[in-house]
Amino acid sequence: MDKFVKISLSLVIVLFLASSCGLDEQKQKLKKDSEYGVLSNEVHEQNMYVKLYLPQSEFPDSVETIPFKVKNLGSTTVTFGMEYLVEKYIKGNWYVIPYKSNVGFIMIAQLLKPEEIYKDQVPMDLLDYRLTEGRYRIVKKIDSKILGAEFQIID
């Protein structure tokens, strides 16, 4: 019985160390600080009124895609590219989540007329990071404005 307890305890310690090494590896991937501080999910200036939003504010850590929308509520057409960033908030700072090395975005301009909605999604398999419990945001440049839509990952 004593041998069984020692083996079980050793196994628990090994599993704990292995799991904490994975967490450290995850944290090391978040090297790049965000260029942006506080971001609004909308801009409303003169004829431009655009909103970046998600259909819900919480997703499970098993989520495969995070959908988002851009809605033009203004009276002029806005333009933006296909690219976006995903960032994680840790201890008062935002960090850019890296993409896998083979990921790129098509360099085309999307035109969004007044009252139109653009729908897109962030596939988790493009990211070189597994989203764990915490606070995140999608960052997107629309015309010359930077918008951010926040969400939570929950267990």
Image (cartoon, rainbow, N blue to C red):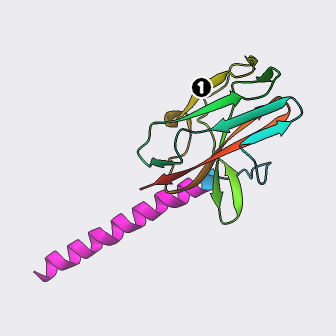
Q: Residue 140 versus residue 77: which sits nearer the camera?
A: 77
Q: Position of residue 74 (x, y in %)?
A: 79, 28
Quarter of the C terminus within the rendering: bottom left
> Is 86 situated left or right of 33 in this image?
left
For residue 152, above or below residue 104: below
Q: Quadrant of residue 122?
A: top right
Name the residue: 27% across, 68% down: 11
Name the residue: 75% across, 33% down: 50
Quarter of the N terminus within the rendering: bottom left
Q: Residue furthest bottom?
A: 2
Helix, strand or loop under label 1:
strand
For residue 18, above or below residue 84: below
Q: Position of residue 110 (x, y in %)?
A: 73, 18
Q: Position of residue 77 (x, y in %)?
A: 80, 20
The residue pinned by badge 1 equals: 119
Give the crowd class for mark 1: few <14, some 14-19, many >=20 residues within 10 Å: few
> Is 153 situated left or right of 17 in this image?
right
Q: Residue 109 versus residue 9: which sits nearer the camera?
A: 109
Most common secondary structure along the magenta stretch: helix
Given the image, on which type of amino acid does mark 1 rest? Lys
Magenta stretch containing residue 23, yes or no? yes
Q: Which residues are magenta?
A: 1-27
Q: Position of residue 83 (x, y in %)?
A: 69, 29
> Is 135 situated left or right of 75 in this image?
left
Name the residue: 80% across, 48% down: 35
Name the residue: 49% across, 57% down: 133
Q: Residue 95 versus residue 147: which sits nearer the camera?
A: 147
